Image (cartoon, coloured by chain):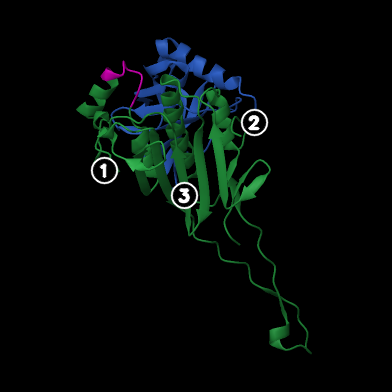
Chain colours: A blue, B green
Amino acid sequence: MSGERRQDARDRSFARILVRVEGRAGYVADVSENGFRAIFAGDFSPALDSPLRVEISFEELGLGIFPLPALARWSKAVEGGAEAGFELAPEAREGPGAGLFERLRSYYDKSLR
Amino acid sequence: MAPYIAYRSQRGETLQLAFSPRAEFRDIVDSFAEIAYPRLAVSRELVSFALLELVSNSVRAHREKAVGEEVRVGFRAGGGELCVTITDAGRGFDPTLLPYDLEAPPDSIDLLGDSFAEYRERHGGSRFGMGLYIAKRTFPRFRLSFVDREGRPCPWFSGSVKGTRIDLAAPLAPEAPRPPLVRLASESASEEELEVLFEPAGVLEPAMAPLGAKGAAR
């Protein structure tokens, strides 16, 4: 699968993402209620449909690094990097990351665009 | 056709933006989404996010040091490159406190290494410390220097650092082949008289996924 599958509304965003194990860093490019799209510097093909240890940071809103279990649903190469779509893992909805992710989403939901 | 950059109603080979340290960050994000770059050999989104990270660093430095001056970002398209210069008055920073050597090739940097873990700990778990790293990966030409009050380069340890200047360049994509010239067929005309050229429209692409925008830069 190599393309966006989310049907819910998306808000443009900027936050930092680090996928542990693979050691890939990038940015959360847009967020929706159930997931996000991220863009990475360099090659990256995350394992699809299995939980990944993802960490997000958005210190502009005072959100330090927080873990957010997520499943990569698609990925594709872009010039100089890669992008991937992530769905929040079921366990993410009960963990502390859920509330912080919601704060991130709601910050960009208030964007003036 | 010469490459150009567009932003709102502006269009040209150069673009200057200035961001107040008091700007709401999501408005800065929206401002970057309104920049239309010429076609690049690197992902436009990656370019914009790498720049946003650097601008965020500068804005944070201005806020921490109560500097009211704006953070300036200059773009220039030409010579087969998109060149960007970010200039702040945030008093610089000690490069030895970064979790990697700024001169090291990006591929040699291990984001999961001990130095990054120490960096995170030092900053209370709030920062990955990867902003300059991603900028280096995204822009093949990267140069960071500290500048004094007159804008002259000066070493960090000189005690006269007013701010940081970062010069970056990413290659433009090779021009697409032009559509064939259209010729008006006329049996009576010589070949030299027949050319009618249709200039292909210039190609501009939005910096980020098109969701619409209203931003903070002026």
- Mark 1 / mark 3, whichever is N-terminal: 3
Q: Is residue B79 left or right of residue B214?
A: left
Residue A75 seen in render = no
How packed mark 3 is, by other alpha carbons closer than 10 Å (few <14, some 14-19, many 20 or more), is: many
Q: Is residue B118 left or right of residue B56?
A: left
Range drawn in magenta: B121-128
Type of amino acid under label 3 = Cys
Q: Name the residue under label 1.
A: B103
Q: Residue B190 or B74: which is nearer the viewer?
A: B74
Q: Give the spatial CA distance, label 1 vs label 2.
A: 37 Å
Query: Which residue is situated farthest in the left direction here?
Result: B114
Q: Where is residue B65 in the image (x, y as percent from the top left)?
A: 41, 21
Q: Position of residue B209 (x, y in %)?
A: 57, 37
Type of amino acid under label 2 = Lys
Q: Is the magenta stretch mostly helix, strand or loop?
A: loop
Q: Across the whole image, how many numbered discs are drawn on residues?
A: 3
Type of amino acid under label 1 = Glu
Q: Where is residue B118 in the image (x, y as percent from the top left)?
A: 23, 22
Mark 3 element type:
strand
Residue at horizontal 27%, vertical 43%?
A: B107
Q: Mark 3 points at which residue?
A: B83
Q: Residue B12 or A78: which is nearer the viewer?
A: B12
Q: Give the spatial CA distance, label 1 vs label 3.
A: 20 Å
Residue B214, disc = 2
The chain letter under disc 2 is B
Find residue B196 and report its image quarter: bottom right
Residue A86, disc = none
